[in-house]
Structure formats: C-alpha cells, structure tokens
Image (tube, rainbow, N blue to C red):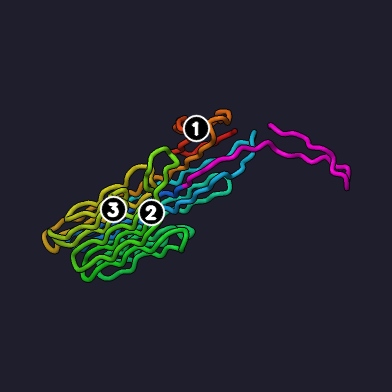
Amino acid sequence: MAARLMGYVSASNTPTLVLDAVSVDYLVVGGGGGGGYVVANGGGAGGGGGGSVITGTAVTVPKGLSLTVTVGAKGTGGTVSDGSCTNGSDSLFYIARSYGGGAAGAAAGSPGANGSGGASGGGGRGASNLGGNGVPNLGNNGGNGGQPGGGGGGGGSSTAGSNGSASAGGNGGNGTTSSLSGSSLAYGAGGGGGAWGATGPAGTGGSSSVGGNGGLAAAGSAATANRGSGGGGAGSLTSGGSANNGGNGSDGIVIIRTADTVATATTTGSPSVTTAGGYTVYSFTASGTITF
C-alpha cells in the first residue's frame, strides 16, 4: 500500500500514518425502474422511475487501496407471463450511493413503487392510481394514472413524471445532465406512461426519450442503455386489444475522472478508459474495482 510516515507529533511522540491521495470527480447513477405491463383492454401502465444521480467534485480518495465500484442493475419491465416489474438497484463508489428508481404501477391497478432510498417513483397505472414517491434532492414523484386509463410517467432525477389523462399516458420526468464522460448526456430520466386506446397519445420518456417511451396499443420501450432511466409503460386498446409487456429500465453507470497527470489506475470490471482535454475518464458499466 502506498503510504508515508509523517514527522512525530510533539504532544505524544507518536508517528502519524497518512495515505497518499488523489483528487477525483465522479458521477454515480442508480439503475432505472421497469415499466408496467397491461392485460388485454386493461388501460395504460405507468413508466418506471429514474435512478438518483450523485456527483462529487475534487473529492480526495486514497492511493494504493482497491476501491469498490458497484453499478446498479436495471429494473425489469412487467411481463404478461408473470405480471411483475422491479425497481432498479443502487450504484456505489467510495462514499457515494445512488439509489435505484421505482417500478411502475402494475396492470392489476396497484400504484407505482417508491424508489429505493428515495429515488424517483414509478408512474401509476390508469384508473387514478397514484405514482410512487421520490425524496427531494434524490428523486421525484411518478405521475398519477388517469381516469379511466392513461398511465402516469415515471419520475426523473430532475423533474416529476406527468399525470396520465383519460386516454393519454403521462410523460416521464427529465433526468440530470452531466458532461463528465466528455459528452453532455442526461441520466436518471423517467419512462413514459402507456396510452389507453388507439389515439392516446402515449407518454414520451424523459429527457427526449432517454427514458423508455410508453406504448400505444403496444409494449413499452426500454430505456437508453446505461443511463439509469425508467422503462416505458405498456398500452392497450379499449376493446379488442392484446396484453403487452412493459419496457426494461436501464442499468446505472459510475464515471470517475482524474487529471491526466495522475498515473493510470488499475481496474477490474473492464471500464472504458479515455484521455482527452486534460482528463482521464473511467466509465464503469459493470461492477469492478479501481486502484490509484
């Protein structure tokens, strides 16, 4: 382990051990929640909630220690075969934990789930079911289901999901934009709610469809990969329609950035490593470790 002994402390004559350290910036995004499914002619399902987004700037971390990186898994969309949809999982790096987004309301009429630890809630299924709750500064509420059938949009890390209406699905809440990867991208967006009927319209995923789009008499779409965003809710016709599946949320991501003058870290988990603009950037899309 890279360490150094400092001088004696005069009061006790005891040497003090101080670890060498490096300054990092980081972005930690939890997994997005899954979108809800619908039974035949069963109204629109809610969209999944986005994972929370945690950032740190000029954070001092020790050299020579293997630091665990956990990338939160996506929540799965509800399926016709088993009906369940799931919350996203938490992501972690050093002292930062980013919570997973909440699952959407199920076709049986249940409300949207709360995200773990306060991340954004999933949208409610139609027939006025409530969206899941988010905690301020960690997430936002999912939209309520409309009466009689549009699904609510999932909450995003920046804004709440929109309520569904009689036939239209609510839009997913917007995510949080970061340029830490080297490109300006949105993370933690909510999924759009599914529509009830042939005209809808279905809800759009937050942050210009980073979250999955709701279905119009069709399955909800999956969220954009590794953005910690919610899946879209399924939609159905008012009569003569089929059951449809909800869209999957997307896995989270952990991005760690150092000055390019810092020696390249040793990693596991196969992160993408890029050097440009004076920085070295480690983008983890799977769990691993990093040692500076």
In percent of width and height, residue 134 lies at: 42, 63
The magenta stretch is: 1-28
Residue 21 lies in magenta, yes or no? yes
Mark 1 or 3 closer to N-term? Answer: 3
The quadrant of the picture occupied by the N terminus is: top right
Mark nearer the viewer, 1 or 3: 1
Q: Residue at x 40, y 61 (%)?
A: 140
The residue that disc 3 covers is 205
Instruction: Say which quarter of the image contains residue 164.
Output: bottom left
The quadrant of the picture occupied by the C terminus is: top right
Which residue is nearer to you in this view: 270 or 63?
A: 63
Q: Secondary structure at mark 2?
A: loop
Give the main secondary structure of the magenta stretch: strand
Q: Residue at x 58, y 48 (%)?
A: 95
The residue that disc 2 covers is 50
In percent of width and height, residue 111 lies at: 34, 66
